[in-house]
Image (tube, rainbow, N blue to C red):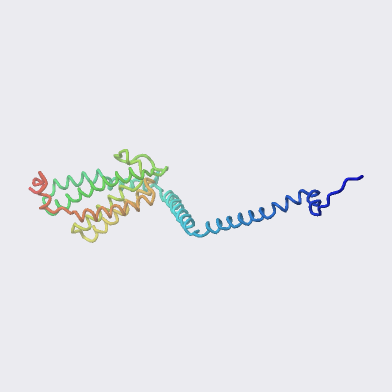
Amino acid sequence: MEPKRKTGGQNDVDDQNPKLLESEQTGPVSASFERTSFHNSTVNIVGKNLNPARPRSNSITSTLVKTLHALDLCTSKKLAVCADHGPLRPLMMLLELSGHGISWLGGCFLALYLTTSIPMKVVLFNLLLALFVDLANIALLKSVFRRPRPMYNKDDMFATVHLDKYSFPSGHATRAATVSCLLLTHLNLSLLIRICVAVWGILVGFSRVMLGRHHISDVGCGFFVGYVQFILVEKIWFTRDVILQFPTMEYLFL
C-alpha cells in the first residue's frame, strides 16, 4: 500500500521553492530599508546645500587674496630694474641713504645742537620722538610678520641689523611718510620746497621697489603706518613748557 501524500496546497509550493519564501519574507523589510536610506541621503544632501554661501564666500576671498599676492610679487619683480645694476641704481642708493634711520637721527641731533630758534628746537625734539616711535613700530611689525625680502634683493644695504632681513613693512617708507608730514605741517616752507619734500617721500618709497628691497605691498603699508605715526605724534605733541619738565631738558633751550 502506498503511503498517503500530504496535500497542503501552498505548503507544497513553499517546500518546493524555499527561495520564493525567503524573498517574500525579506522583500518588505528590504524595501523599507531602501526607502529609509533614500530619505536619509536626501536629508543629508539638502542639509549640505542649505547654506552654500559661506564656503563659497570663503573660497572667493581666498582666491582674491592669492590673486592679489601673485600680482604683488609679479609687479614688484618687474619694477625692480635696479636690483642688480642699471643707470639709476646710484640715484636709488642715494635715496635709500636719505631715508635711513641713522641719517635722520644723526641729522636731528646735529640740528638740535646747532639751531638757536626755540620753535625749531621744539619741532626737532618732536621729530626725534617720531623717529624713535618709528623704529619701535618697525621692529615690532617686522618681528611679527617676518616676511622675507625678495629673492632678487642684493645684500648690500647700509648699516643693517638682524630684523632688516625682513621685508614687511618698509621702514624707509614709514619714515619718509612720517618725516614728510611733520615737516610739511610744522615748517614754514616755500611752495617749491614743499613740493620737493613731498616728491622726496614718494621717491624714497618707490626706490625700495626699484632696488628690489621690498614688494609694492611693503611700501604701500609702510606709507600707511607712517601716516598713522604722524597722527599719533600730532596727538602727543610736546610744547616747550612740557619739554622743560623733563630732567636736563632746560639745557636744550639755553
**Residue 140 falls in image quadrant:** top left
Query: Which residue sits at x=87%, y=48%?
Result: 4
In the current view of this chain or complex, which residue is farthest to the top? Answer: 162
Q: Is residue 196 left or right of residue 244?
A: right
* 76 vs 48, nearest the viewer: 48
Query: Which residue sits at x=37%, y=49%?
Result: 209
**Horizontal and vertical percent position of residue 175:** 27, 50
**Horizontal and vertical percent position of residue 183:** 22, 55
Q: How many numbered discs, if any?
A: 0
**Horizontal and vertical percent position of residue 111:** 16, 47
Q: Pick the quarter of the image with the N terminus.
A: top right
Query: Which residue sits at x=64%, y=56%?
Result: 32
**Horizontal and vertical percent position of residue 200:** 29, 53
Q: Would you place residue 180 above or below residue 152 in this image?
A: below
Q: In this view, does 41 lie to the left or right of 55?
A: right
In the current view of this chain or complex, which residue is farthest to the right? Answer: 1
In the current view of this chain or complex, which residue is farthest to the left? Answer: 254
In the current view of this chain or complex, which residue is farthest to the bottom? Answer: 191
